[in-house]
Image (cartoon, helix red, strand yellow):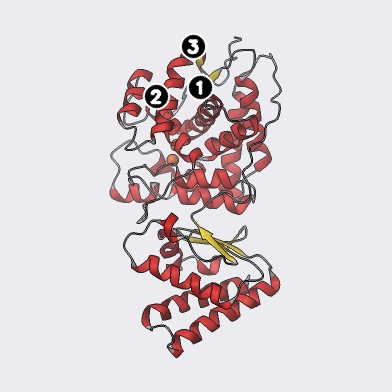
Amino acid sequence: MSEAVAFLTALAQALSALALYPTGHASRERAIDGAYQHLLDLLARDASPEFSFLEDEVVYGARPLRELRDWDWNKRLSDVGIQRLQFDATTTRPELEDFLDETMARLTLKAIDTAEARQMRPSGIRFGVLGIRGADELQTDEITTASLSYSLRDEAETIRWLHREVTEKNELPLVEAETVVRSLAVAMHGDEQMLMPLLKLRHYDEYTTTHSLNVSVLTMALAEWLGLGDRDVRAFGIAGLLHDLGKVRIPYEVLHKTGTFTDDDRRVMSRHPAEGANIIITSATDLDLAAVVAYEHHIMINGGGYPSYRFKRKTHRASRLVHVCDVYDALRSDRPYRDAWPPGKVLAYIEERSGHEFEGEAAHAFTRMMREWEPQVTEVEEDEPLPQS
Ligand SMILES: [Fe+2]
Ligand SMILES: [Fe+2]
């Protein structure tokens, strides 16, 4: 751990030196040598170190580095599209220098497209926006179908328990999250015809539970409608289920406020994407997709929303789908500050904002699916059995 902290500290010193001194200057070379030496020390203990920079937290592998909690460079790197940074055991000093130059260019230039800027020489250093590790090959496997009588009570209870666990232990019970999604997938395929069970909100303060389940169902339906395989459908379902996980860290008074939001409330609320990504990344190494979606689900394609970026960035397809499902479920639910909208009005709202707030493919697919599958949408109370199709 300490090697990781020492290396990042030296890396930041080298970046500061790059800003101050021209190429070849002794102070600059010394700072790069220092950073490289610390990298070698780190590589001696960990052959493929990996860092994630998430707003106000640095994560090394799956462990948050408490020592770097208020580290300025975290947000600076994240803002310029360096949210994940990985080193190979073979990384050379020139590669580190190239990386530092590239980072400096990003920090000092106002707008470069990250995709273009990433055209560096082949290197033992990989970096970029928070993304998916490894290949995302599409695999399919069978979803067990059953024609039992389902209600969503167990799923809702599990989600309430899961939120409590995350609040108390700061760790996500992954197996249970996966179980809920698997069980939603089964409920959706109770008979030949697909079913979209959406929970009715019972109390305002249960919104996060109801909403998580509904966004998971809607996202899975949409992924299925777009022809994705079962495994991907479920991965998208988990991402939908966990998209607002960061809300467990928002104080109750803000989360359930009935009056107008102040700027401070808004600031607190806008932290939930980074908080959620953080909880997911530090709990499970194979939930990258869910972490990405938690982080990106409020980013609009016109650059609006939050977290805000100085760079153009294309969000993950799953984030774009969850974004539409998220807004749909929010608007169709009663909230303390407004009544639920009828489904038709919500769909018109999404269409109107397609290409600005929502990405065209996601908005178009969603509105078409909802119109076509309308008979399959069933609003249910938590204890009510799902209808048999
Ligand atoms: Fe959210
Ligand atoms: Fe949400």
* Closer-to-camera residue (173/142): 142
Type of amino acid under label 3: Pro
Q: Is mark 1 in CB contact (under 8 Å) with mark 2? A: yes
Residue 182 lies, in percent from the top left, at: 65, 30
- What residue is rendered at 54% in x and 83% in y? 33
Type of amino acid under label 2: Arg
Q: Nearer the viewer, mark 3 or mark 2?
A: 3
Position of the C terminus by quadrant: top right
- What residue is rendered at 66% in x and 72% in y? 43
**Which residue position is annotated with label 2?**
332
Q: Nearer the viewer, mark 1 or mark 3?
A: 3
**Which residue position is annotated with label 1?**
198
How far apart are labels 1 and 2 at the CA level?
10 Å
Q: Is residue 90 left or right of residue 32?
A: right
The mark nearer the N terminus, 1 or 3, is 1
Position of the N terminus by quadrant: bottom right
How far apart are labels 1 and 3 at the CA level?
13 Å
Type of amino acid under label 1: Leu
**Which residue position is annotated with label 3?**
375
- What residue is rendered at 64% in x and 51% in y? 285
Helix, strand or loop status at disc 1: strand
Q: Is residue 69 left or right of residue 166?
A: left
* Count of numbered labels shown in the rendering: 3
- What residue is rendered at 34% in x and 38% in y? 357
Q: Is residue 375 left or right of residue 346?
A: right
The mark nearer the N terminus, 3 or 2, is 2
Quarter residue 323 falls in: top left
How far apart are labels 3 and 2 at the CA level?
17 Å
Helix, strand or loop status at disc 2: loop
